[in-house]
Image (spheres, grey):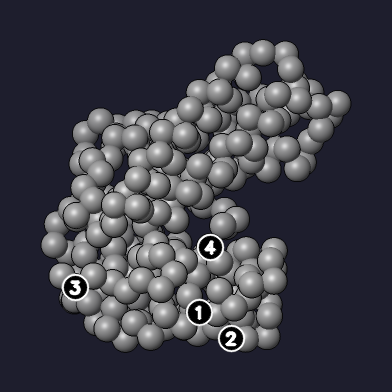
Amino acid sequence: MTHTLDRRRFTAAALLALAGSVQAVTRTDDGAMIDFDALYIPPLFLTGAAAKSPEGPARAQAALARLQGQWPALRGRLEAVWPRDTVWLRTVGAVQGQLADAARHAGRGAWPESHEALEQVRMALWRAREARGMDYVLDRFVAFHEPMERLADAAVKWTPSTLGPRQRAELEKHFVEARARWRAVEALPIDAAALRLTPVREAQLRKAMTDESAALQALSEALRGADAAALLKTAAATKPPFVRAYTAFGLAEGDALPQR
């Protein structure tokens, strides 16, 4: 999950306004999107992690196959959301090609390329929903992902000895943006039934959201201190709870979509 989002699309001020004035969509027309994401998120995550364990490739392949098997029906449901919107229809049509690219790359063991093809799906659907003015639940998580990723990358780019005033200022800028975007996530009403969450996945989501809020608070405190090593450690610690929160929306391995 390393794709860079367009900063112009979500400003901190806009997200603060969003958090205070707009509730997340729970209309009937987001059911297809929720079901798609339930099948899409596992291969998105697993292709990114496939090379990290012996069982990783098989798990990623299985998740991709499950998504592809459900795709024809999901495509029809997604197209039916805005059946007269040519941009939306083209976007949904393009998803099919991106899924095929992901499977092709996975077939030859090119996991970074497979993961990137799936990242393109998330970005394309997000932009198309944004163009329609739709405040879709998972898009708030997607908006948070970019500044959070930049914070987490700090521990890779810098060491305590190279963390000077310029680097600290850059970290603070990303933190301010991440905190504003996370407030929009915190404002979400978590309706487990509407989001098709099992009790286990709901518990995972709620705990991860709490942990992410705590991680950002810890980073805020570290930014006010002088301990460079602690600052880099707390910046890196913002990523794991986000991953747990986002993947809670994905079906567990072996599970099928519940009947509506």
The amino acid beneath tag 4 is Phe
Q: CA distance from mark 4 to mark 1?
A: 12 Å
Q: Residue at x 42, y 80 (%)?
A: 66
Q: CA distance from mark 3 to mark 1?
A: 21 Å
Compared to residue 82, the image places residue 186 above or below, namely: above
Residue at the top extreme, as displayed: 225
Q: Can you say which quadrant of the picture contains the C terminus?
A: bottom left
**Residue identified by numbered label 4:** 45
**Residue identified by numbered label 2:** 104
Q: Earlier in the sequence, mark 2 or mark 3?
A: 2
Q: Can you say which quadrant of the picture contains the N terminus?
A: bottom right
Q: Residue at x 22, y 62 (%)?
A: 30
Is residue 169 at all visible to an observer of this figure?
A: yes
Image side of residue 38 versus residue 158, left or right:
left
Frontmost of labels 4 and 2 is: 4
Image side of residue 249 versus residue 26, left or right:
right
Quarter holding residue 83:
bottom left
Frontmost of labels 1 and 2 is: 1
The amino acid beneath tag 2 is Arg
**Residue identified by numbered label 3:** 259
Compared to residue 2, the image places residue 236 above or below, namely: above
Labels 1 & 2 near each other (Cβ < 8 A): no
Quarter holding residue 184:
top left
Labels 4 & 1 near each other (Cβ < 8 A): no
Secondary structure under the numbered disc 3 in the rendered image: loop
Image side of residue 233 versus residue 120, left or right:
right
Secondary structure under the numbered disc 4 in the rendered image: helix
Q: CA distance from mark 2 to mark 3?
A: 30 Å
